[in-house]
Image (cartoon, rainbow, N blue to C red):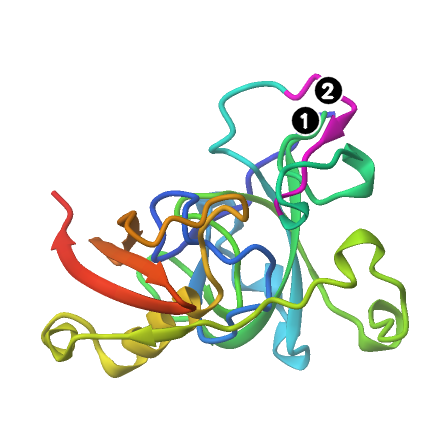
Amino acid sequence: MELKTIAHFDSPFSSKFGIPRQSGLVESLKGKIIFEQEYRNPDFIRGIEGVDYLWIIWGFSANKHEATSPVVRPPVLGGNEKRGVFATRSPFRPNPIGLSSVMIDYIDYNSPVGPTIYVKGSDLMDGTPIYDIKPYLPYTDSHPEARGGFSAPFVFQQLNVSMNDSLKNIFSDDDIQTLRDILAQDPRPRYINDPQRIYGMPFLNYDIRFRIADNIVEIVEAVRLV
């Protein structure tokens, strides 16, 4: 079976680091679904205004090596315990396919690149190939009482974020709020806790450099990417 790329994703993230670990964790994070030329006929999305959320089926295009092991080390377990690849959401899979649920923000039918779907709450990198989109159906897709496996006991602690007012000269208020929401999720690998280490996270053509100590994220500087 050959998968055809129907669209690609436009995201503030040009690398994997910093992207929320799951879709929906940072609702303020915006992105765009931009269709390939073949699928820019508005009829392909006729009636989509009637749904609030979409399932996006996409490819882990940034993975450079083939998955060969039946087990992985989930970051939520500190990278110390193994679980079966089919019991996790690891990107290293026999078929590198991802599934995300995103909220429709609005649709621009007059975009120069054809109908464009603006969404919130994504976990996709910029340029990610999209193979299909489907409507989220609350009466079948929502299971609030379902068990969550090994991830259920873990509650992501929101960090406090300290920002310099100089960021207001670079980003809009909405982008600053999104950046704050992203950093509050603690983008570091679970097994790294070095308060002196400075991390770099690409965001909207800037390298956001920050450190984390005592549950406080301090943005050191924002450097324009070349």
Q: Is residue 108 visible?
A: no
Res 166 → quadrant: bottom left
Say which amino acid is labelled 1: Glu
Label 1: which secondary element: loop
Residue 11, compared with residue 120, is above or below; it is above
Say which amino acid is labelled 2: Ser
Q: Which mark is residue 69?
A: 2
Which one is nearer the viewer's eye here, 21 or 120? 21
Does the magenta-highlighted stretch encompass residue 93? no
Which one is nearer the viewer's eye here, 115 or 174? 174
Q: Which mark is residue 49?
A: none
Q: Main secondary structure of the magenta part?
A: loop
Label 2: which secondary element: loop
Q: Is residue 221 left or right of residue 75?
A: left
Q: Which residue is mark 1?
A: 2
Residue 104, compared with residue 17, is above or below; it is below
Query: Nearer the viewer's eye, disc 1 or disc 2?
Result: 2
Q: Earlier in the sequence, mark 1 or mark 2?
A: 1
The count of marks equals 2
Counting from the top left corner in percent of width and height, residue 207 is at 22, 51
Quarter of the image with the N terminus in it? top right
Counting from the top left corner in percent of width and height, residue 103 is at 58, 73
Residue drawn at 44 percent across, 70 percent down: 184
Res 92 → quadrant: top right
Quarter of the image with the C terminus in it? top left
Find out whether the residues at labels 1 and 2 contact each other: C-beta distance under 8 Å: no
Residues shaded magenta? 67-75
Counting from the top left corner in percent of width and height, residue 208 is at 24, 56
